[in-house]
Amino acid sequence: MHASKGDRLLMHGRTVGHGDHMVEIVEVLGTNGEPPYRIRAEDGHETIMWPGPDCVVQHPKSTEPHTIH
């Protein structure tokens, strides 16, 4: 998985009643665009995460999501 600052991370809901949500990648802490990432939710909460297979990176200049492998 490769991401850059400003990319969006779509996290698919894993249980019934918990839909997908989008966060912004505000800092890439790994090398060459790899995780971990510092992310910011819509409510302003920030955390560091290592995305799993239920996440998709969306680049601002692209309409195609990139699936984590």
Image: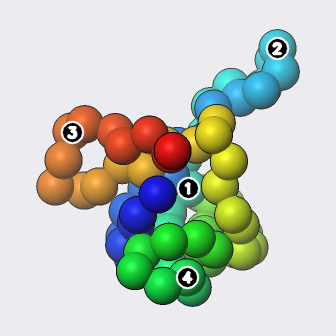
Tell me the distance, in whole angstroms, between the alpha carbons under discs 2 and 1: 20 Å
- Please, what is the three-letter code of the amino acid marked with disc 2? Val
- Please, what is the three-letter code of the amino acid marked with disc 1? Val
- Please, what is the three-letter code of the amino acid marked with disc 4? Gly
Dot 2, crowdedness within 10 Å: few (<14), some or many (≥20)? few
Q: Earlier in the sequence, mark 2 or mark 1?
A: 2
Tell me the distance, in whole angstroms, between the alpha carbons under discs 1 and 3: 16 Å
Q: In the image, residue 43 lies at what x, y percent? A: 67, 61
Q: Earlier in the sequence, mark 1 or mark 4?
A: 1
60 relative position to 5: left or right: left
**1 and 4 marks in contact (CB < 8 Å):** no
- Disc ID at residue 63: 3
Dot 3: what SS?
loop
**1 and 3 marks in contact (CB < 8 Å):** no
Q: Earlier in the sequence, mark 3 or mark 2?
A: 2
Q: Is residue 30 above or below residue 6?
A: below
- Disc ID at residue 23: 1
- Disc ID at residue 5: none
Query: Which quadrant of the view contains residue 16?
Result: top right
Q: Which residue is mark 2?
A: 16
Q: Earlier in the sequence, mark 4 or mark 3?
A: 4
Q: Nearer the viewer, mark 1 or mark 4?
A: 4
Q: Is residue 9 above or below residue 4?
A: above
